[in-house]
Amino acid sequence: MPKLHVVTDSGSDLTSRVLRKLAIHVVPLTVQFEEEIFHDGVDISVEQFYERLQSDDVMPSTCQPSPIDFVQVYEKIAEPGDTIISVHLSTKMSGTYQSAVLAGTMVEPDIKVVTVDSKCASIGAGMIAAAAAEAVQKGLGLDEVLDLVGQAVESLHVYFVVDTLEYLQKNGRIGLASALVGTLLNIKPVLTLVDGEVAPFEKIRGKARALKRLHDLAAEMREKHPNRRFRVGLSHSMSPMEAEKLAEALREILPLDGEIMIGPIGPTIGVHTGPGTVAMFAYPVG
């Protein structure tokens, strides 16, 4: 009987436990420090990455998987007649989606590949992939899975606080938030994503106040979607205590659908955000 499979990339920042539980397959991006190239989550750990990021003089870069990288994974997991749902980083941030689309034209003709632009990154993209995988495990058909995924993509709220805009600026991912560069010392902008592109939301003095603002934004989400429960994810770059403190607050503020998904921001996204970032992702269900 034909099967549905879910694939994502390392920019989704899903933990190994979640990947195993939901049978999600990952195609890694690479991160490059000068002449050294590492596959995210394969031959460099999160801890090793941030240590290098802060100690090396040269800013690292990332590279999307090639179409061949995707083809190898697709043909390894799928049999003729199967369908692969491939969920990836926002097209405004990476060419990974385009590589997956091209790979879909290169696989065996009896294998169907449906690519999904999450319009997000980190655990936000991971939540979309997880929603697809959970629907597959429940036995939903392709059209039902894609309808559910589409709703999640369009209703996902994203807010994040960075310690500095330096990394987003140097790596060309600052997007619409470029207007904030050069603002006053200790201004910690709350950023968001607009159609998958980084954009400014609010300027706040001090990180503690910026993180507290995320509590308020969660309360606004609850008011905007009364009688709805929320899927919530948090990611952080070497700031586990700040993420857990935020999680504790969100458990009181929002009616949750399942556990809050918490995890570190890996090399793929960490190159662009730098250390000290905390991100909140949420969408209503039911």
Image (cartoon, helix red, strand yellow):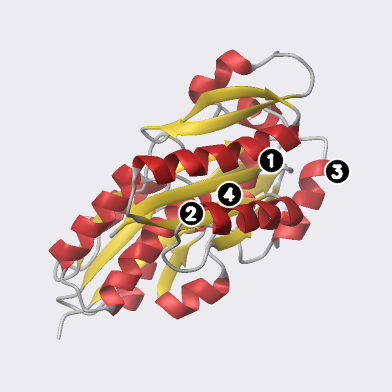
Which residue, given by chain and number where applicable, does mark 1 sit on? Answer: 60
Q: Quadrant of the C terminus?
A: bottom left
Residue beneath the point at 32% across and 59% down: 86
**113 and 286: which is toward the camera:** 286
Give SS at disc 1: loop
Q: Amino acid at mark 4?
A: Thr
Identity of the residue drawn at 23% across and 80% down: 79
Q: CA distance from mark 4 to mark 2?
A: 29 Å
- Residue topped by disc 3: 55
Whether the residues at callouts 1 and 4 have beta carbons within 8 Å, the answer is: no
Circle on res. 268: 4
Q: Amino acid at mark 2?
A: Leu
Q: Secondary structure at mark 4?
A: helix
Q: Amino acid at mark 3?
A: Ser
Q: Earlier in the sequence, mark 4 or mark 2?
A: 2
Instruction: Give residue 128's position: percent from left, percent from top.
Output: 37, 57
Quadrant of res 42: bottom right
Expressed as whole percent of the image width and height from the top left, the position of residue 31 reads 62, 49
Q: Residue at x 35, y 52 (%)?
A: 284
- Amino acid type of the residue that numbered disc 1 sits on in the rendered structure: Pro
Alpha-carbon span between mark 2 and mark 1? 37 Å
Quick check: 229 above or below 182? Answer: below
Q: Which residue is mark 2?
A: 254
Q: Nearer the viewer, mark 2 or mark 1?
A: 2
The mark that comes first in sequence, 3 or 1, is 3
Measure the alpha-carbon separation of dots 2 and 3.
39 Å
How crowded is the residue under tag 3: few (<14 C-alpha within 10 Å), some, or many (20+)? Answer: few
